[in-house]
Image (cartoon, rainbow, N blue to C red):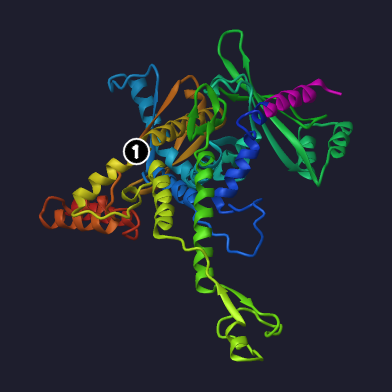
């Protein structure tokens, strides 16, 4: 039997044992608890029965969704640059590289739309809030259809492009958990449970023997096989390194070691709260759980008190009242005997009186929990201001603590952009890349091999954050147009996307009218 699968599984088990040692319950168990509390399954395992209503006032989800929405509220774009390349336009080579980098910056937006990056960011942030760590894996998918062809007769389609997947942190294992930078890790391992037929098909594609296929089939459990994918560095004699990969089951090799051609691990990690000297982040939910339990218990007790006050418990004299009493409002009870028997047949037990201070305590606990988490009434929009300026000032002050998390997210996006550029340069070869301009969609020639030597960097450009809607922005543009500050062409160009049908066609017609004049 090959030694590689056994060694990789031992490395995986070591990393899994480290995760199990984190916190009081271990990472995986704590993450399962956090997930239940986030979605609202907050009485799980309490063994309270079904006799009384178990109330949930989910402050955890409201805090999380508020923070996630604020992080994603601003539009993001990326500008690429290259180390060692000047912006001097008199240098022809530098000018050409600058034009290519500008095209890649635009192509980032095209790719983000294709892979549905906004949806991936939403899922990643949810994972990070619940578990402390969000992971985005970018890989080359040879099956992606591009719509391009290598010949004029369109008989040789160009296939293959990058794809992205959000990974659960429970299935990602780092060689050294005390190294916070992913790119400094000696290796990274991914765990996945794959359909047996898919694993066998992939193994056949990469030349697995009949004996190997038999071993893989024997490892099947519930129709699936556990597969480990290992990414690691191999250093070159002349300096630098390349990223290699191997895919195995516990006792067999699915795909032999191969060179990915990449210079970066195609893995970007976002920590919601950083732990000092640890690559795994900390979840805010873990420390909100005790408050959530207290809130649910207090509200449940308050609701139960209100119900028993409105429908108090009935006590009956069994000597004078027969069976069939249900304590339902308006029920007629037959009593046989004297007036004294009637008077003493039924009594109600008055429940304990919960004073107003109890309800105030519940409300105070909810407000304090929200405030300490940075989700106070100003941030949530529940407060009132005298004018728009006061509202924006109050809102900016309330959102200030969230900027630390936002900055970490922006760094994560920049790291993802560099990974995308690394994949483009490694796999694209000679092909056309899609671009969108004022005159519509065009395809621009791109030779990746020509720019493989570049050391690319990325810089996030954050769109302006505003509380105004597209309607209000359009009204402001109309005012400027009516006053003659903007001409027709400038007005159309600045109209928010989606408000004008065929905006670019209308803009082109406006330019043609201007040329005729």
Q: Seen in the image, is 452 located left or right of residue 202?
A: left
Identify the residue shown where x is 75% and y is 24%: 10
SS at circle 1: strand
Q: Quadrant of the N terminus?
A: top right
According to the picture, the residue beneath numbered tag 1 turns out to be 462
Residue pictured at 65% horizontal, 39% vertical: 29
- The answer to whether residue 429 of the structure is visible from this angle is no
Q: Quadrant of residue 330?
A: bottom right
Q: Is residue 20 left or right of residue 509?
A: right
Q: Which segment is the magenta one?
A: 1-17
Q: Residue furthest left?
A: 483
Check residue 12 for magenta coloring.
Answer: yes
| Closer to us: 28 or 143 | 28
Q: Is residue 501 left or right of residue 343?
A: left
> How many numbered callouts?
1
Which quadrant is home to the C terminus? bottom left
Q: Position of residue 328 (x, y in %)?
A: 59, 80
User: In the displayed structure, would residue 150 be above or below residue 276?
Assistant: below
> What's the residue at 49%, 39% (across, down)?
284
* Residue 290, horizontal then vertical, whole percent: 53, 43
Residue 198 visible (yes or no)? yes
Q: Is 184 colored magenta in this rendering?
A: no
332 in relation to 90, above or below: below
Q: Main secondary structure of the magenta part?
A: helix
Instruction: Specify the farthest residue to the top.
Output: 238
The image quarter containing residue 470 is bottom left
Q: Position of residue 514 (x, y in %)?
A: 19, 52
Q: Residue at x 54, y 69 (%)?
A: 308
Crowding around mark 1 (Cα neighbors within 10 Å: few <14, some 14 to 19, many 20+) is few
Foreground of the two, 246 or 514: 246
């Amino acid at each position: 039997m090959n030694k590689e699968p056994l060694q990789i599984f031992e490395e995986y088990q070591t990393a899994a044992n480290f995760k199990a040692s984190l916190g009081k319950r271990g990472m995986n168990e704590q993450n399962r608890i956090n997930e239940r509390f986030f979605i609202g399954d907050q009485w799980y395992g309490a063994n309270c029965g079904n006799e009384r209503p178990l109330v949930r006032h989910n402050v955890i989800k409201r805090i999380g969704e508020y923070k996630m929405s604020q992080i994603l509220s601003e539009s993001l774009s990326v500008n690429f640059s290259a180390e060692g390349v000047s912006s001097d336009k008199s240098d022809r080579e530098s000018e050409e590289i600058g034009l290519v980098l500008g095209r890649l910056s635009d192509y980032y937006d095209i790719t983000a739309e294709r892979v549905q990056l906004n949806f991936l960011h939403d899922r990643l942030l949810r994972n990070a809030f619940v578990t402390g760590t969000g992971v985005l894996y970018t890989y080359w998918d040879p099956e992606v259809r591009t719509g391009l062809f290598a010949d004029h007769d369109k008989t040789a389609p160009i296939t293959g492009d990058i794809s992205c997947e959000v990974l659960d942190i429970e299935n990602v294992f780092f060689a050294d958990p005390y190294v916070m930078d992913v790119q400094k890790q000696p290796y990274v391992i991914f765990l996945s449970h794959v359909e047996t037929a898919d694993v066998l098909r992939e193994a056949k594609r990469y030349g697995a023997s009949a004996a190997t296929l038999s071993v893989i089939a024997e490892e099947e459990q519930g129709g699936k096989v556990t597969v480990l994918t290992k990414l690691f560095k191999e250093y070159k004699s002349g300096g630098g390194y390349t990223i290699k990969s191997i895919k195995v089951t516990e006792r067999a090799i699915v795909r032999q070691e191969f060179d990915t051609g990449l210079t970066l691990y195609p893995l970007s990690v976002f920590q919601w709260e950083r732990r000092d000297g640890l690559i795994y982040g900390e979840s805010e939910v873990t420390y909100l759980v005790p408050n959530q339990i207290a809130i649910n218990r207090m509200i449940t007790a308050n609701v139960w008190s209100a119900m028993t006050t409105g429908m108090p418990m009935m006590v009956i004299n069994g000597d004078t009242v027969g069976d069939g009493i249900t304590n339902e409002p308006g029920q007629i009870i037959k009593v046989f005997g004297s007036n004294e028997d009637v008077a003493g047949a039924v009594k109600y037990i008055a429940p304990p009186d919960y004073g107003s201070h109890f309800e105030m305590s519940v409300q105070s606990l909810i407000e304090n929990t929200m405030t300490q988490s940075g989700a106070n009434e100003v941030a949530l929009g529940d407060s009132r201001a005298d004018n728009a300026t006061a509202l924006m000032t109050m809102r900016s002050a309330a959102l200030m603590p969230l900027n630390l998390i936002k900055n970490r997210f922006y760094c994560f996006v920049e790291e993802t952009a560099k990974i995308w550029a690394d994949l483009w340069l490694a796999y694209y070869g000679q092909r056309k890349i899609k671009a969108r301009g004022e005159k519509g969609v065009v395809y621009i020639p791109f030779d990746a091999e020509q720019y493989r030597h570049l050391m690319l960097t990325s810089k996030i450009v954050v769109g302006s954050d505003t509380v105004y809607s597209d309607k209000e922005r359009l009204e402001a543009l109309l005012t400027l147009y009516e006053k003659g500050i903007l001409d027709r062409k400038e007005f159309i160009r600045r109209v928010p996307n989606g408000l004008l049908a065929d905006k670019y066609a209308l803009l082109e017609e406006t330019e043609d009218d201007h040329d005729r004049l």
